[in-house]
């Protein structure tokens, strides 16, 4: 039977990254492509204890029952306390909406805010999953100029800022570049938002992963009236729980609620109860996050060292201060998407940069994810990539 798909569905393309991930399922492939957290950081014994305790307790009925669309109240309260303490602000639990991964928040934001041809401002490059969410509602993207420190607020002219529906930003250890927006730019962006009544969507799944533990002020603390903040437990607990949250004023949340109800009624109660048990015991994150930072920092330093050892001088990359990604820039004549085909033949995968640009502006960049790869594989993989790149450079010189 020929399916009568909607125009929206007909126009959707599957993400290149997801296609690449299929290749990485083969055991002998060295993958720098996925954005997966390291499984060795998943708090297995704590999750097991919390699940066991729950199963033996009356609470299990609540955990298996339908629950409120806003989320499990104790978890919302826990998040409000956590943010108030971490960010030196006053967040209340009714300003928290629990979502099924922060990816759901991106989808709800697209649904709630974007009409066809609305202007949406994004970083250059930006997170592909956000574009997938927003694309469903047909916005016109304007890519804000960026450099090695992230987006440049001075390049956003006031007319554009005041006419845009929102600006989507990942200020901490951005996906895909690993960049962190410096304080002076955060302040300039907050001022620009206030001056032009511009809504900022601050997506912050990597904010707790700063290797030195020195957090910069979040945009929602600098421009509270103008910012919707998105947090996630995917990188500090486990992504399979599918737990994230959105922080906004009550009016905004009340607009999102019917949209969330239409998509899943509420985020699974079971994972919310388990996460709450884990998080609320003995200041769990205070011990857990430093371990993740240490592991990720070690893997990052190892990859930086391998890049320095093997890559030719024509290739450059950044030195991330946190997170899970390094952004590599190749000579302009090397197309990273083409390079990937050669790398796959040698059982190496990475994420080509082109897919992260709204207008495909640049194709000589790539993203390397390092946290799930052993030191030995980092060494082998980077050496092989460097050999392929050197071959291209030599051919260009001929
Ligand atoms: N935003 C960004 C910038 C991400 O990198 C990711 C995950 N890769 C998400 C949102 C989605 O995360 P979650 O697992 O919370 O849905």
Image: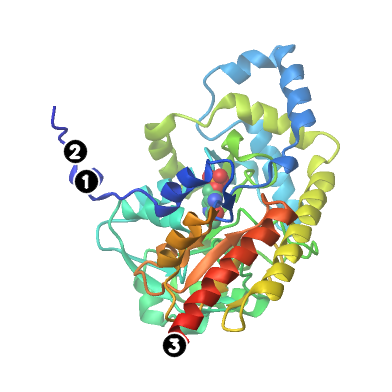
Disc 1: CA contacts within 10 A as few (<14), some (14-19) or many (>=20): few
Residue position for label 2: 5
Q: Disc 1 to disc 3, how far (Cα)?
A: 45 Å
- Foreground mark, 1 or 3, reads 3
x and y, in percent, of residue 200 in the image: 49, 64
Q: What SS does tag 1 mark?
A: helix
Residue 81 seen in the figure = yes
Q: In the picture, which quadrant includes the C terminus?
A: bottom left
Mark 1 or mark 2: whose residue is earlier in sequence: 2
- Distance of label 3 from label 2 (alpha carbons): 51 Å
Task: Give the left or right position of residue 7, taking residue 366 as reference.
Answer: left
Q: Disc 2 on helix, strand or loop? A: loop
Which numbered disc flags the more N-terminal residue, 1 or 3? 1
Give how far apart the Cα atoms at labels 1 and 2 are: 6 Å
Residue sitting farthest toward the front: 398
Crowding around mark 2 (Cα neighbors within 10 Å: few <14, some 14 to 19, many 20+) is: few
Mark 3 / mark 2, whichever is N-terminal: 2
Q: Residue at the location (16% across, 33% down)?
A: 3
> Element under label 3?
loop
Residue 79: x %, y % from top left: 68, 43
Residue hosting label 1: 10
Question: Residue 182 sits in which quadrant?
Answer: bottom right
Q: Nearer the viewer, residue 370 or 178?
A: 370
Q: Residue at x 62, y 44 (%)?
A: 234
In the image, is 333 to the left or to the right of 96? left
Judging by the rendered image, the residue that carries numbered circle 3 is 398
Is the residue under label 2 in contact with that under label 1 (CB below 8 Å)? yes
Furthest residue in direction bottom, as rendered = 397
């Amino acid at each position: 039977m020929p399916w009568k798909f909607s125009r929206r569905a007909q126009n959707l393309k599957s993400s290149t990254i997801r296609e690449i991930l299929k290749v990485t399922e083969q055991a002998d492939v060295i993958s720098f492509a996925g954005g997966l957290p390291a499984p060795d950081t998943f708090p297995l014994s704590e999750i097991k204890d919390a699940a066991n305790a729950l199963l033996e307790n009356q609470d299990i009925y609540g955990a298996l029952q339908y629950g409120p669309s806003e989320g499990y109240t104790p978890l919302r309260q826990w998040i409000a306390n956590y943010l108030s303490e971490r960010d030196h602000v006053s967040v209340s639990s009714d300003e928290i909406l629990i979502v099924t991964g922060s990816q759901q928040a991106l989808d709800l934001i697209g649904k709630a805010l974007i009409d066809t041809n609305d202007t949406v401002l994004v970083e250059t490059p930006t997170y592909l999953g956000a574009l997938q969410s927003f694309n469903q509602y047909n916005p016109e993207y304007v890519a804000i100029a960026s450099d090695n420190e992230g987006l440049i607020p001075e390049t956003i002219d006031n007319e554009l800022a005041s006419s845009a529906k929102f600006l989507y930003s990942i200020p901490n250890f951005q996906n895909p570049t690993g960049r962190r927006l410096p304080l002076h730019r955060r302040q300039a962006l907050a001022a620009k938002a206030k001056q032009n009544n511009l809504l900022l969507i601050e997506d912050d799944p990597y904010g707790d992963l700063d290797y030195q533990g020195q957090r910069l002020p979040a945009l929602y603390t600098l421009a509270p009236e103008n910012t919707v903040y998105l947090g996630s437990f995917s990188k500090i607990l486990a992504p399979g729980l599918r737990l994230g949250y959105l922080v906004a004023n009550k009016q905004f949340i009340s607009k999102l609620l019917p949209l969330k109800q239409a998509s899943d009624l509420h985020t699974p109660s079971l994972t919310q109860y388990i996460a709450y048990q884990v998080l609320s015991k003995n200041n769990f994150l205070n011990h857990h996050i430093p371990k993740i930072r240490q592991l990720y920092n070690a893997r990052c330093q190892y990859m930086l060292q391998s890049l320095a050892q093997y890559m030719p001088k024509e290739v450059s990359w950044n030195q991330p201060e946190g997170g899970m990604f390094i952004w590599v820039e190749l000579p302009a004549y090397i197309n990273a998407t083409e390079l990937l085909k050669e790398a796959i033949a040698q059982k190496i995968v990475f994420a080509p940069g082109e897919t992260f640009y709204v207008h495909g502006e640049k194709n000589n960049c790539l993203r390397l994810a390092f946290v799930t790869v052993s030191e030995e594989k980092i060494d082998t993989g980077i050496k092989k990539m460097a050999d392929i790149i050197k071959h291209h450079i030599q051919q260009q010189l001929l």
